Image (cartoon, coloured by chain):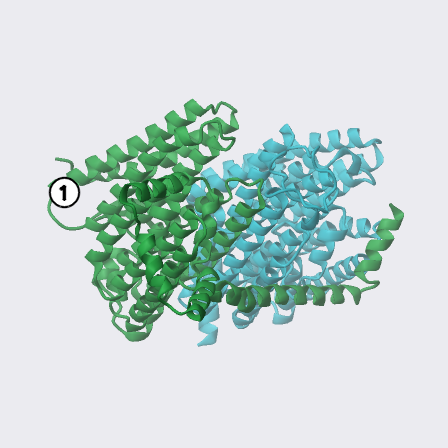
Amino acid sequence: MSAWVQYSLIFLWLTPLLAAAALRWGVRGATKQRALALGFALPIFLVACALFVHEGTRHAYKEDHLEQGLGWLHSHFAVDGLNAVLLPLTAGLVLVALLMTPRADMRAGLAAKIMVVEGALMGSFLALDAGVLSSFVVLSLLPLWFDAKHRGSRPLQVIMKSLVVATGLALAVAMIGLAFEASAAGVQNPLDLVELTKSPYTPSPWIGTLVLAVALLRMGIVPLHLWFPATAQHSTPHLALVTCLTPLGSFMLARLALAIFPRVLGPAAPLLMAVGVFTALYGAFLAVGQFDLRRIVAWFWVSQSGLVLAGFAGLDDASVSGALLQAMSTVVECGGLMLLTLAVEVRANTTDLRKLGGLAHNAPRMATAYLILAAAAVGFPGTISFVAEDLVGQGLLREHPFVVGLLFIVTAVNGITLWRAFKRTFLGPPSPHADDLRGFEDLRRWESYAIWGMIGTLLLGGFLPEPLLAVRRGVVDAIGRVEAAASVERH
Amino acid sequence: MLDSNSLAHVIALAPAAPALGAVIIALLLAARLASERVVATVAQTAIGLGFLGLLVGLVGWAAGPAGPLELGFGSWYSGAGYDFRIDLLIDGRSAAVSALVSLLLAATSQFSIAYLHREPGFNRFFLLMLLFGAGMQALVLAGNLELLFVGWEIVGMTSVLLVGFFHERLGPVKAATRVLVTYRLCDIGLLTAGVSLHRWLHTSDWMAAEQAALTSPWPSTFVGLSLVFAAMGKSAQFPLGGWLPRAMEGPTASSAVFYGSLSVHAGVYLLLRAAPLLEHSLAAQTMMIAVGAITAVISAMSSQASPDAKSALSYATASQVGLMFVEIGFGLYTLATIHLVAHAVLRYYQFLRTPSALQDALARRAALGRTEADEGAVRWEALGLRTRRYVYRMAIERFDVEIALERYVVRPVMALSRRLDRLESQLLALHGESERRARDSKGGRR
C-alpha cells in the first residue's frame, strides 16, 4: 500500500472530526460555518474519489476482501472492495447536504454535527477492528441524539435515546464477549477482523446475533424501524439525511455479520429473508398512502432496506452482488429525493402533498430531477437499481421463487408511490389549500450541479455496472464461502 | 452482401439512432440551446437514420439465407452464472413490426413539427417521442425477454409522460396516473414470466425457449398466464382497459402513434413473440380467448355510446385488439400479425384525423346522403326501450368494471396503508406524547 493511501485512510475519518471541533468551538456565524465545512468536505470528497479510482483500477480486491492497513492505536484501517465505493458516496452525500442546507438552518452547530457524522461513517467503513468499528457506529448516532434533545418531539427523544443506548449496549456486550472468547482461543489481537478471519476460532452465535440486531436496527428493518420515520419527520432534516440514509447497516451486515459470524448466518438466513420481504412489503404499503413527502422517502427507504436484506439472506453470489449494489444506489436515490423534498419544504414551507401541486411550472429543473431520481429508485432500465434488482431477482429465483414474486409486487407499489408523490407535488394545478406558490423558485445553480451529479452517478453506474460489480467481487466471494459453510452445516 | 456483423450494426441503428437523438435533445435542453428548428432537425435525422439502417439491414437479411437471424452484441452485465445478453432477433414478424414502427415514427415527426409549432412542450414531445421509438424498437427486435422488458419499460414511461403532456391541467395528470398504475401492475406479469423462464428453461432467449419449450403443464400454465396478464395491461384488455380512453388527454400525434397504433399493440406483439410457449398451456389460451372476446364486445358497445370521437376510437381500438387476442388464442398467428399491422395503420390515420372528425362526418353525410351510423340507429330503435336503456347505461359505464376495480382493489390497498399508518402512529405515541400534541407544541414554539 503506498504512503498516500495510508495517510488518506486516516485523513478521511480524522479530518471531519477535527473540522467538527473547529466548527463547534472556533467559528461563529452560519455563513462562515458553512464555508469552513464545505472547505473541509470538498477535499475529503476528492480524496475519497481518488482512493476509489486508485484502488479500483489496481483491482487490488480480487485477492481478498481484507487488506493489512496502517497500524495505529492497535487497530487497522484499510480500503477494500466493500468500502471503496462507500467512501466517495458518503463524502459526496455530505458535500451535497452541506451545499443544499439553507443558511438559516445552519444554526445550533449543524455543520459540526454533520461533520461528526461524516467522520464516524468514514471511520466505520475504514476500520478493520471490530471495537473501533463499533465505537464509530455509536458515534455516528450521537449528533442525532443531541439534536433530538433540542426538538419538541417527546417520542423522538425517547426513541433516539433508546436507539443510542440499545446500539451502544449491544455492541459493547458483543465486543467484550468477542474479546474474551478470542483471547481464550489464542487470537493475539482479539478484535482485529483480519486476524479473526484467518484464525480457526469462530465466535459464539450470541455475539453474532447482537451484531446482526444492530445492523438490522441501523437498516431500519421491521420491527426495529420505528426510529427511522420518526427521525425523518421530526429531526433536523439535513442531519437526519446524512445519518439515516447511509448504507452503514448493510455494511455491518457484510463486514461483520456475514463474514465474521457465519455460524449465525446459516440458520438465520431463512428468517432474515422472511423479515426482509415483510419489511419490503410493509414499507411499500405504508408509503403508498402517505401524504407527507418526507415520510414517503423514509418508508421507501425502509422498503428498499427489506429488499437489500432479502438479497443478502439469499446467500447467492448474484443476490449478494445485487444487494450490495442496491444498498449503494438506494443511498443516492433516497438522498437525492430527500434533498429535493427539503428544497421544496424550504420554498413552500410544507411537504404535505395536499398543499402542493403544479410546481413544475415554476421549477422545471427540480421536477425533472425528481422524476429521474424516482424512476431510478424503482429500477428503471439504465440505472443502477435496475441492475441491482435484476441480480437480486436472478439470485433468489433458484431457491426462493415465491420471494421474487413478492419483491416484484414491492417494486410495482413503490413505483406507484413515487409517481403519486411526483404528480401531487409538481403536476396539475396548485392545490386549493396551498399557500401562494407563484414565487416558488427552481433549483439554484449549485443545487442543480449537486443533484445532476447524483443522477449522473446513477446513470453511469447503470449503463456501465461491470466496474462496480468487479470491485465487490472479492466480498461476494467471501460471502460465497459463508454460503458453502452454511450449506454444509445444513446437510 | 452484408456479413452478419455489419448487418447487426446496421439494424442496431433502429433503436440506437432515436436513443442517441433523445440524448442529444436532452443535452441541448440542458444547455438551453434547443430551438424548435434544431430539435426537429435532430429528431428527423435520428428517425431517418434509424429507418435507413433498418431498411438496409432488412434487405440484407432478406437477401441472405432464409429463417430467423439472431444478432449478438455481447453482455450488458453478468454475475454468478447470470448474463444479461443484448441480442436482436430478426424474423418475419419482427421485421414487419419494426418497419411499421420506423415508418409511423417518421410520419409522426413530420406531422408534429407543424401540429405542435409554438407549443410550450414542443421539445419535450420530441424527446419523449424519440425515447418511445427507441424503446419500441428494442421491444420488437429483442432477442430475449430481458431486452424486451427494457423496451417495454421505456415505452411505458414515455407513454405515461405523454398522456400527462398538458401537465397544468388535472385531467391529463390523473389519466397519466391511471396509465402508470395499470402498467406497473402488469409489469409484475412480465417480470414473473422472465424469472420463471430462467427457472424452468434456464434461458429467456426467444429462439432457445422455442426449441426447449415448456411441455409440463404447471410451468407452461404459470408462464403463459403471467405473459397474458402483462399483455392485458399494455393492450387495454378487460378488466384493465380503463386507461385507454383516458390516455387520449395527450396531444393528437401521441394518441395516434402511441395508443392508436403502436403502444397498444405491444401486448399483442409480446403474445405473438411468446406464441411457442403459450401453445403448451390450455389455460393461457383459454384466458386469451375469453379476455379478448369480452373486451371486444364491451369495447365495441362502449365505442358506440361514447360522446366524443377520440374516446369512441380508443374503445374501437381496444375492441380490435381483443379480436387479436382471440386470434392468438386460436393459434392464428399470421392472421393476428396481419391484423396488427393493418389495424395499426388504420388507427394511426383515424387518430390523426380526429381533430376534423365532425367535418369528415358531415362531408360523408353530404356525399352519401346517409351513413353507417344511420343504419345502426334503425337497428338500435328495433330493440325495446328498457333493453336499450339498460344496454346504453352499461355501455357508457363500461359494464361497471372501473367501479368494481376501485371498490375491490384500490380502496382496500389504500385502507390497508392508512391502517398501518395509524398503527405506526400509535406505536410512536407509546414512546411519549401523541404525535398531534408534539406537532402542537412545535407549532406553539414557532
Taking the spot 69% from the left edge, 34% from the top edge, the residue there is: A438
Between A180 and B429, which is closer to the camera in this rendering?
A: B429
Answer few, some or many: residues within 10 Å of disc 1's Cα (few below 14, many 20 plus, some between 14 and 19).
some
Q: Residue furthest right?
A: B445
Q: Position of residue B425 (x, y in %)?
A: 74, 63
Q: Position of residue A70 (x, y in %)?
A: 61, 43
Q: Residue furthest bottom?
A: A491
Q: Position of residue A110 (x, y in %)?
A: 78, 40
Between A224 and B48, which is closer to the camera in this rendering?
A: B48
Taking the spot 36% from the left edge, 56% from the top edge, the residue there is: B318
Between A183 and B92, which is closer to the camera in this rendering?
A: B92
**Picture quarter containing residue B190?**
bottom left
Mark 1 = which residue?
B62
Taking the spot 27% from the left edge, 57% from the top edge, the residue there is: B272
Where the C terminus of chain A falls, by quadrant?
A: bottom left
Amino acid under label 1? Ala
Q: Position of residue B26 (x, y in %)?
A: 47, 32
Give the left or right position of residue A83, taking residue A318 as reference: right
Specify the colour of chain A.
cyan
Taking the spot 70% from the left edge, 37% from the top edge, the residue there is: A437
State whether residue A67 appears in this view: no
Dot 1: chain letter? B
Establish if A230 lies above or below A126.
below
Establish if B424 lies above or below A123.
below
Secondary structure beneath dot 1 equals helix
Which chain is the one coloured green? B
